[in-house]
Amino acid sequence: MAVTAEELGTLDIKKLLINQAVPASIGILFMSVNVLIDTIFVGQWIGSIAIAALTVVLPITFLISSLGMAIGVGGGSVLSRALGANNREKALSTFGNQIMMTLLLAVFFVLVGLFFSDKMLLLFGAKGAIMVPAKEFFIPIIISVPFLALCMMGNNIIRAEGKAKFAMIAMIVPAFFNIIFDIIFIKYMNLGIFGAALATAISYFMCFLFVLWFFIFRSELNLKIHHFEFNFPIIKEITKLSIVTFSRQGVVSILAIIINHNLYAHGGENAIVVYGIISRMLMFALFPILGITQGFLPIAGFNYGAGNYERVNKSVTISIKYAAILATLTFIVIFVFAKPIVTIFTTNPKVIADTPEALRWVFAASPIIAIQLIGAAYFQAAGKAKKALLLTLSKQGFFLIPLVLILPNFMGIFGVWISFPIADVLSTILTGFFLKKEMNSHLINTNDGIL
């Protein structure tokens, strides 16, 4: 059932969350499957060292393209609240400025990435035998990043309009084309890792074409030329909230640098391959929880903008409950089937021996992460940038990076893996404290409990 922006403030919260979260989850699933299958094809048809190359390159490209995601999420919060307050002109100007900001920033950073490609790859851990395949994969991918950035930005605006099914399709499109072209370029044309990069680049462009089609023919946001003019108060508001998402991705990229260097120092290329598999599973296995978080954002943002605080409170409560159940099921599957999962990626016996235990430790605290994800998302949806930034950065920035820097000195590679559940627990406690305080002091027009 398609939902109009106005219905975000009237429909039953449970039905509305399912309506928004299921398509978002399916979209994230396909996006995750895309990365997962890409890694499987590369590992099985090219070799395990190619997985290490992907592990080095993808944090760089996602860092640059996350500009689009950040502007999409931050601007989506502004846009949702503007629609909730019935300020349509502000919503349109917000969208126009998002397009211009994404395009200009993405192109600038792509040029920087191309100019400093060798130094950047070395910084992210392309040591030893990893450098050559990493550079071969990097160049086609980095050139296609502006299209990915525009897709990420546009996808958040599609969701802010309440058109979750179209947002889902936007994430399915690149997954479909990437898998098809992976088979053609890697298996049949024998283009190796360059073929994998070319397939990914084409898939980003196909996603961009779909998003462009949506905004021309299906969107409620009919832009005029003047909406693309820079509106500095709106840019400031978008930037303030976008910093939350971009900072998170920036911290994730810093974390990737630290982990890759630590793993190489303690275990060489094989240790980076192990982390490559784990990082893909982190993207894939948590798709339903991330889908609920994405579905929650426009509901909370619209109702907060409309002053419907009881609905905001209810949406927080329901989202945490649903996400916690799904996160627990995910943990059980990972714990039971860790070894069969690893054998899908590679035939390397050393990697198969080392990865299952590491995978279980990394996912050990996943049943409690719903509070952290939904809590941080609430503050972003409400436009409370400082708390959103604090809580979004808490896991990777305040806890995980220091732990990864310290524990391996005493515990070796195991110190890297045990850092993940410790960081999950600490960041959840911190988010739970702020969220409960917020619910009790600002959103008290309801009898529903929260934590």
Image: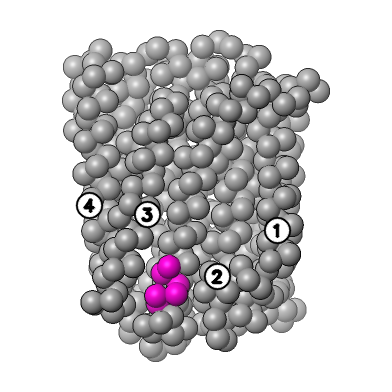
Q: Residues within 10 Å of mark 1 (few under 14, many from 20)?
A: few
- Vertical placement of residue 253 versus 93, above or below: below
Q: Which residue is mark 2?
A: 123
Nearest to the eye among marks 3 and 2: give it: 2
Queried whether the magenta region covers residue 262, the answer comes back as: yes
> Residue 425, labelled with which disc?
4
Q: Which residue is mark 1?
A: 112
Q: If you read the primary sequence from the N terminus, does the residue marked by circle 4 or circle 3 appear first?
A: 3
Give the x, y percent position of residue 293. 40, 39
Q: CA distance from mark 2 to mark 1?
A: 14 Å
Q: Amino acid at mark 3?
A: Gln
Q: CA distance from mark 4 to mark 2?
A: 29 Å
Q: Secondary structure at mark 4?
A: helix
Start-end of magenta stretch: 258-263
Q: Which residue is mark 3?
A: 396
Give the x, y percent position of residue 400. 33, 58
Q: Is residue 261 left or right of residue 309?
A: right
Q: CA distance from mark 1 to mark 4?
A: 37 Å
Q: Residue at x 45, y 72 (%)?
A: 260
Q: Nearer the viewer, residue 120 or 202?
A: 120
Q: If you read the primary sequence from the N terminus, does the residue marked by circle 2 or circle 1 appear first?
A: 1
Q: Amino acid at mark 1?
A: Val
| Quadrant of res 31 | bottom right
